[in-house]
Amino acid sequence: MGATAARMHLRFDTGRTSLDLVAAAAPGPAAGPGAGSPERLVEWLRGAGLVPRGTEVPADGGWARRFMELGAVVARLVEARLAGRTADDGDVEALNDAALAPPPPPRAVRAADGTLTRGLAAEPDCAGLLGAVARDALDLLTDPVAAGRLRRCEGDGCTLVYLDTSRGRRRRWCSSETCGNRERVARHRRRAGATATRI
């Protein structure tokens, strides 16, 4: 599948960059087409706001592999938190190591129409971009309030974990437009089927 198809399946509705990476790196339908490819990674980096659109990103297979590995580490740490288990020391160490590298600093640049837009002061590098995601995960998992808002989507077959910032903490789905809509459609069909059976 081409870049357009991959772009259509990228998800950025978990509420945190690190959880978005988990969704993109997860095996199965949640990851969408092209998961693990350099092209898909560049689209994800741009969609996540880690690099401005139009920025050249020299990603290759090594970059894609390292991001998939960090996504798996964060996924295991999040799962441990949700299950009330102690996090694996190796995963904690891998997260801490990744968080050491500073992300490329932002820079204001002038667009063609004279307005200011965001750019980067240096060429993006893999370690720095991994560092930005790892720091987000570190902040999330070490903040008891934020970590307490982690939820698993209740959508049928969905494995996404998201941050519930809704009023009353009653959010049930990773996205109202995807899993929430599917659940509403399924509920309507069940009701319609039950009504037809009674007639």
Image (tube, rainbow, N blue to C red):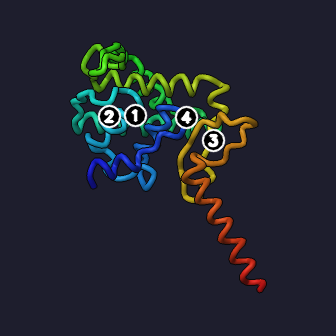
In this view, the mark in front (4 or 2): 4
Quadrant of residue 142 in the image? top right
Q: Please say if the residues under marks 1 and 2 sit with CB atoms less than 8 Å apart.
A: yes
Query: How far apart in space, not on screen, are marks 2 and 3 (Cα)?
Result: 26 Å
Q: Please say if the residues under marks 2 and 3 sit with CB atoms less than 8 Å apart.
A: no
Question: Mark 4: which amino acid?
Answer: Gly
Question: Mark 1: which amino acid?
Answer: Leu
Q: Residue at x 41, y 27 (%)?
A: 94
Query: How far apart in space, not on screen, are marks 1 and 2 (Cα)?
Result: 6 Å
| The C terminus, quarter of image | bottom right
Horizontal side of 12 relative to 38 (left or right) equals: right
Badge 4 element: loop
Identify residue for label 1: 70
Q: Which one is earlier in the sequence, the residue at label 2 or at label 3?
A: 2
Q: Which one is earlier in the sequence, the residue at label 4 or at label 1?
A: 4
In this view, the mark in front (4 or 3): 4
> In terms of depth relative to the viewer, which is nearer, 170 or 101?
170
Q: Please say if the residues under marks 3 and 1 sit with CB atoms less than 8 Å apart.
A: no
Q: Which one is earlier in the sequence, the residue at label 4 or at label 2?
A: 4
Badge 2 element: helix
In this view, the mark in front (3 or 1): 3
Badge 3 element: strand
Q: Which one is earlier in the sequence, the residue at label 3 or at label 1?
A: 1
Identify residue for label 2: 66
Question: Mark 3: which amino acid?
Answer: Arg
Question: Mark 2: which amino acid?
Answer: Arg
| Label 3 Cα neighbours within 10 Å, binned few <14 / some 14-19 / many ≥20 | many
Q: Residue at x 68, y 71 (%)?
A: 190
Identify residue for label 3: 151
Q: Position of residue 48 (x, y in %)?
A: 42, 33
Q: Position of residue 126 (x, y in %)?
A: 29, 26
